[in-house]
RNA sequence: ACGCAGAUUCGGUUCAUCGCUGCCUCGACGAGAGGGGGAGGAAAGUCCGAGCAACACAGAGCACCGUGCAAGUUAACGGCUUGAUAUUCGAGAGGGUAUAGUAGUGUAACAGAAAAUAACCGCCCGGGCAGUAAGCGUCUUUCGGCGCGUCAGGGUAAGGGUGAAAAGGCGGGGUAAGAGCCCACCGCGAGGGCAGCAAUGUCGCUCGGUCAGUACGCCUCACGGGUUGCAAGGUUAUGUAUAUCGGCAAUUAAGGGUUGCUCGCCCGAUGCCGAGGGGUAAACCGCUAGAGGUGGCAAGUGAUUGUCAUCGUAGAUAAAUGAUGAACUAAAACAGAACUCGGCUUACGGGGUCUGCAAAUUU
C-alpha cells in the first residue's frame, strides 16, 4: 500500500482553490471542517488533490499551527487508502481546515479524518 | 554543604516503523535506487543600526523626528566596553535609575501659613483708646505710672507639626526684636596648583558673604536624518490592452513629482510615429561564503583588534525539517527560518561550569 504523499497530490493551483471554495460542498467533523469539489475522471482512475489549512484566527502561534498541520497531513497520509478503494472513480479536490482553538492530539484528528474520508468514498 | 551575586554554557537523547524536502551519484534532466544534509537562543517583537536593490537627487528657509556625562570600540548604531558624578536597594559580593545648556519661561496634586512674589500667625517698636472700634485692673490725694486688652502704622524673617522639595548649617557676637548684619568652623561657587586623554577628583592656597531648591515641560545648543523594502529587483516563455517610456507637433493650465509647508526646480492636455506589456499566484535568478564559525597565539582592564590553523553549516514557495510507539526520565519550557548581518527588547521548565560573598544555621 502506498503511504507516500508527494507534492503532486497537494492542491496548489490558485484557480482550483478558488473554484473549490466557491462551488464545493462542505461539512464538519470535530475538530475539522472540510470542503470538497468533485469532477468526473477522464481516465476512470481515482485522483485526489488535498489541501491542509490552519487559520491564524484559531491558533496565533506559528509553531502550534505547524504542529497541527503536520498531524493533519499525517492522518490523511496514513488513511488516504480509504478514498482510493472507492467504487466510484472521480477527480476530487479536498480542503481540510482545522477549526479549534486547542492543539488536539493525533488520535482525535485521525478519527475525524477517517470519518471524513469514509463519507467522501461513498 | 545549604543560601546568595555576577559571568558563561546546554536547550532532550537513543532505537523501531512510516513519511517530507532540496543536494550528490547511477539512471535519461523522467520513474526509481543509494548516500549524506535539513530551524533558534531567542528563528519572535520589528525597536535601532548597516549591507544589498529600485526610485529620487537643484537648492534655500522653516517645520518635524531622533540622540544628548567622558573616553574608547565598530562597517554602523540610539548598541557595547571602561570610567565619572548623583541617587537608591542589599549584611556583603553586587544590582537599579539618572546625566547637553539654564539666558528666558510655564506648571507643581494632597498636605501646609506659604511652592518662590511675598502675604498670614507669631516676635519687637513707638503711638492712640476716639471719629465707624473697647476698654479693664492696679498703685496713687491728683497729675500720672505699671500691667492686660484692643486699633491702625512701622520693623522682622529666628519659630510655625506639612511636604518629593521650604531660600546654607551650627556656635558666638550683635539687636527693640531679628537677619551673613559681623566673626570662626563646615558647606557652596569662582580662580589657581596637583592628578587624569577626558568626564571629573583633590587641596595646611586665594577670592566671593550668599552666592546654589527639586521635578516635569516649553525653549536654546550640538550632532544626525531622501523614500520604499527581496511581494526589492532582474531574466525567460507566451503576447489581445486602457498602464508606462522616447521622439515630433501643439499647448501654458488643471494636475502631478521633489519626506511636511513656503519659495524654487522638473514633468505636463491632445494627436501621430516608435518602443513596451495585463493576466497565467508560470519558470529561473536574487538565495546564501558571510563585517562567517571554531581553536591557538599576541595586544588591551575590557568592548574589540591582529595573525595562524581549521571547518563547510537549511534555503522551502501554500511553504520541507515530521508522525506514532518504546526506553532513559517526567506526556521537557519558550517557541518555527522566508534576502543577509550587528545589536536591543520580550518569553523560557530544568540543568552544567567558573569567579566572588559570608549575616544566621549545620558539620
Image (spheres, coloured by chain):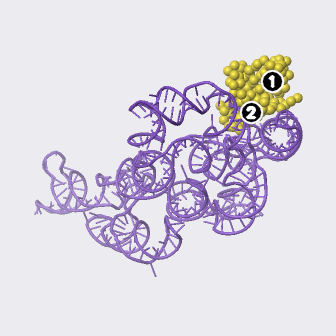
Chain colours: A yellow, B purple
Q: Which label belongs to residue A113?
A: none
Residue B246 placement, left or right of A103: left
Q: Residue at x 68, y 33 (%)?
A: A59
Say which element carries label 2.
helix
Residue B344 in the image: above or below residue A55: below
Where residue B70 appears, as percent x and y from the top left, is 51, 63
- Closer to the camera, B86 or B1? B86
Q: Which quarter of the figure is the C terminus of chain A placed in?
A: top right
Q: In which quarter of the image is the N terminus of chain A?
A: top right
Note whether B163 is above or below B259 in the view shown. Answer: below
Local packing at callout 2 (Cα closer than 10 Å; few below 14, some 14-19, many 20+) is some
Residue at point 75%, 23% (across, down): A93
Q: Can you see residue A40?
A: yes
User: Along the horizontal axis of the image, is B347 left or right of A10?
Assistant: left
SS assignment at label 1 = strand
Chain for numbered disc 1: A
Residue at image point 77% right, 22% down: A92
Give the quadrant of residue B233: top right
In which image quadrant can residue A78 be found? top right
Which badge, 2 or 1, comes first in the chain's sequence? 1
- On the question of residue A28 being in view, the answer is no
Q: Residue at x 74, y 21 (%)?
A: A36
| Residue B157 x %, y % | 32, 60
Q: Say which residue label 2 marks.
A: A69
Q: Mark 1 points at which residue?
A: A47
Amino acid at each position: 500500500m502506498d503511504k507516500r504523499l508527494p507534492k503532486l497530490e497537494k492542491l496548489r493551483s490558485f484557480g482550483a482553490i478558488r473554484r473549490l471554495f466557491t462551488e464545493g460542498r462542505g461539512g464538519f467533523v470535530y475538530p475539522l471542517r472540510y470542503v470538497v469539489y468533485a469532477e468526473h475522471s477522464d481516465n476512470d482512475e481515482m485522483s485526489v488533490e488535498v489541501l491542509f489549512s490552519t487559520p491564524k484566527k484559531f491558533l496565533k502561534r506559528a509553531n502550534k499551527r505547524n504542529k497541527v498541520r503536520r498531524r493533519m497531513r499525517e492522518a490523511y497520509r496514513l488513511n488516504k487508502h480509504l478514498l482510493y478503494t472507492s467504487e466510484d472513480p472521480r477527480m476530487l479536490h479536498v480542503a481540510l481546515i482545522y477549526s479549534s482553538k486547542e492543539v488536539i492530539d493525533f488520535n482525535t484528528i485521525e478519527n475525524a479524518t477517517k470519518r471524513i474520508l469514509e463519507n467522501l468514498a461513498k
